[in-house]
Amino acid sequence: MSAISTLTTSAMPGTYWHWRGQAIYYVRAGVADPQRSPLLLVHGFGASTDHWRKNIAELSNDFEVWAIDLLGFGRSAKPNMQYSGDLWRDQLHEFVTEVIGRPVVLVGNSLGGYAALCVASQHPDSAVGLVLINSAGPFTELNAPATTQTLPVQRVLGESVRWVLRQPWASFILFQYFRQRSVIRQTLEKVYLDKNAITDQLVEDIYRPSCDPGAPQVFASVFSSPQGEKVDVLLEQLNRPLLMIWGEGDPWMDIQKRAAQFRKHYPQLTEHYLRAGHCPHDEVPDQFNTLVRSWMLSISN
């Protein structure tokens, strides 16, 4: 393992950790406190550590805060390989073990929520708690709504279209379309209730990594990756405090039905609903930060 210091375009200091021969970008803020667990923030599909800019500065006043770019996203390497929940689970677990050095509270949005749940359930030595924000991932129930089973980018497309897009040339064409700044903005306008939260900086933070070599292959892997462990199975294995935060205006998920599934399989969870879309941590950061801070202090006592 080796580390090289650098600076992000958002003026937040970052570092590269070398994992399995690949450069992994992460950010650290705040001061370690032996009485309070660190936070590890995990972004969703197409996002990066930049998506936590409104949370890191505030939460680091009270906690040591880490944020990481999953392999294939943000400033991390984008090798041509098979991406999966198991891969990101292993990345997060080994990051906690090798870099942070003590268990954390994992905080994940969408895809990052599913990866965080995999860590907390299957590597409980790395987690003391879990915060899931409009978390993705499939449930076993046959009657679970299709809109809760897959990643947002997959739900935009029908099954026959997804079959075509498993062909490299087709997925490349679609990637070139979705990576346009105008299309990124249009997508954000669908999933953010507060349009004022959609800034040029946010669009640029999503656009910039799409220019990296290997980015089209990462996008294509969405259509060929094997489905990971079911969320209900993971919840049955979980034995950690769980805070669910829902942006109730998320058009990609039936929040009420999905929340009921989480409560069914993990009734001891704590949950809050915010007037926001798919990314409440970025859309209503003050409310989100307050909820996380209060919950963190409650589980530390």
Image (spheres, rainbow, N blue to C red):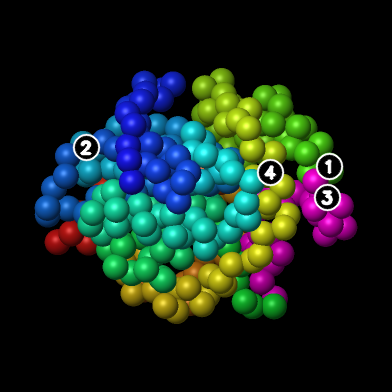
Magenta span of residues: 143-168
Q: Earlier in the sequence, mark 2 or mark 1?
A: 2
Does the image show residue 134? no
Say what secondary structure mark 2 lies in.
Answer: loop
Give me the C-alpha separation between circle 1 and circle 4: 11 Å
Q: Position of residue 103 (x, y in %)?
A: 26, 59
**Amino acid type for the residue under numbered disc 3:** Gln
Give me the C-alpha separation between circle 4 and circle 3: 11 Å
Q: Earlier in the sequence, mark 2 or mark 4?
A: 2
**Amino acid type for the residue under numbered disc 4:** Gln
Residue placed under numbered mark 1 in the picture: 169
- 146 within the magenta span: yes
**Marks 3 and 4: in contact by CB < 8 Å?**
no
Does the image show residue 160? yes
Q: Quadrant of the C terminus?
A: bottom left
Q: Which mark is residue 30?
A: 2
**Amino acid type for the residue under numbered disc 1:** Trp
**Marks 3 and 1: in contact by CB < 8 Å?**
yes
**Amino acid type for the residue under numbered disc 2:** Gly
Say what secondary structure mark 1 lies in.
Answer: helix
**Marks 1 and 2: in contact by CB < 8 Å?**
no
